[in-house]
Amino acid sequence: MFRKVLVFSLLIMLMWTNTGYADVREFFGMKILNPRNLYLSEPVDLELAKRAFTLTSIDKKGKVHYKCDLSITDDSIYCYAWLSDKGIVIDIYNYSKMPIEFNSFADKYYLISKDESFYMVTIDTIRSYPKILNPKNHLLFSLDFDTPGVNISEIIYVAILLDFGKCCLFLKQIEK
């Protein structure tokens, strides 16, 4: 456990160092069901995703508490993310009965701004990309990307499509 906390702390410090202590935004999310909007070009039905869960509080240890609509969420898979203008640190918890597969060519990462514009990011760190997250485990990893023309301070949602689109993680910004 101590090693995981140490690795996590080092990743956050590296991210802040790489960005010159730029604005780092925190997000919490979970798996949403039926995430695709069949009528629009966006990869996620944003109105459905926004209704999926509500952040209710954050305790002294930083753990997020929420209420969710179980008809459109799977709260056995949840995650935290820290976003800067140079990359993202992601911590995914899989308490479901199925593994989650990662594929650097098929997985998609979207940043969604206040005006509901979608920006697909291109990942620069393919070499260290994870392969699988087994049940009853969590996975912490960092990805570098380039976001030309995207103002990170305007990003309020992150959508991550994994496992060839079978797993959609929808994250909301944690207000400080």
Image (spheres, helix red, strand yellow):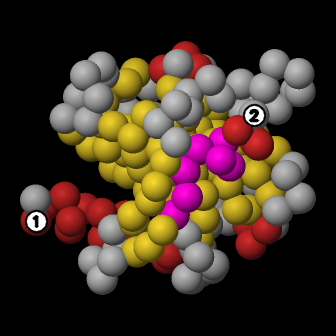
Q: Where residue 58 sits: x, y (%)? A: 40, 74
Front position in the image: 122 or 134: 134
Q: Which residue is mark 1?
A: 2
Q: Residue at x 87, y 49 (%)?
A: 117
Q: Quadrant of residue 7?
A: bottom left
- Disc marking residue 45: 2
Q: Is residue 31 visible?
A: no
Estimate the x, y position of residue 49 in percent, counting from the top left. Answer: 66, 42
Q: Nearer the viewer, residue 76 or 19?
A: 76
Q: Which residues are magenta?
A: 49-55
Q: Residues within 10 Å of mark 1 (few under 14, many from 20)?
A: few
Is 141 left, or right, of 53 in this rendering?
left
Marks 2 and 1, Cα distance to the nearest angstrom? 39 Å
- Residue drawn at point x = 76 percent, y = 43 percent: 47
Q: Earlier in the sequence, mark 2 or mark 1?
A: 1
Q: Position of residue 77 (x, y in %)?
A: 38, 38
Reply yes or no: does residue 23 show up in magenta.
Answer: no
Q: Amino acid at mark 1?
A: Phe
- Position of the C terminus, as image quadrant, is bottom right
The amino acid type, in three-letter code, at marker 2 is Asp
- Where is residue 57 drawn, in percent x and y? 44, 73
Residue occupying image coordinates x 30% and y 83% = 60
SS state under label 1: helix
Please state, as top left, top right, bottom left or bottom right, where the N terminus lies in the image.
bottom left
Residue at (27, 43) in percent of width and height? 138
Q: Which mark is nearer the camera, 2 or 1?
A: 2
Q: Relative to residue 169, is residue 154 drawn left or right?
A: right
| Residue 100 visible (yes or no) | yes
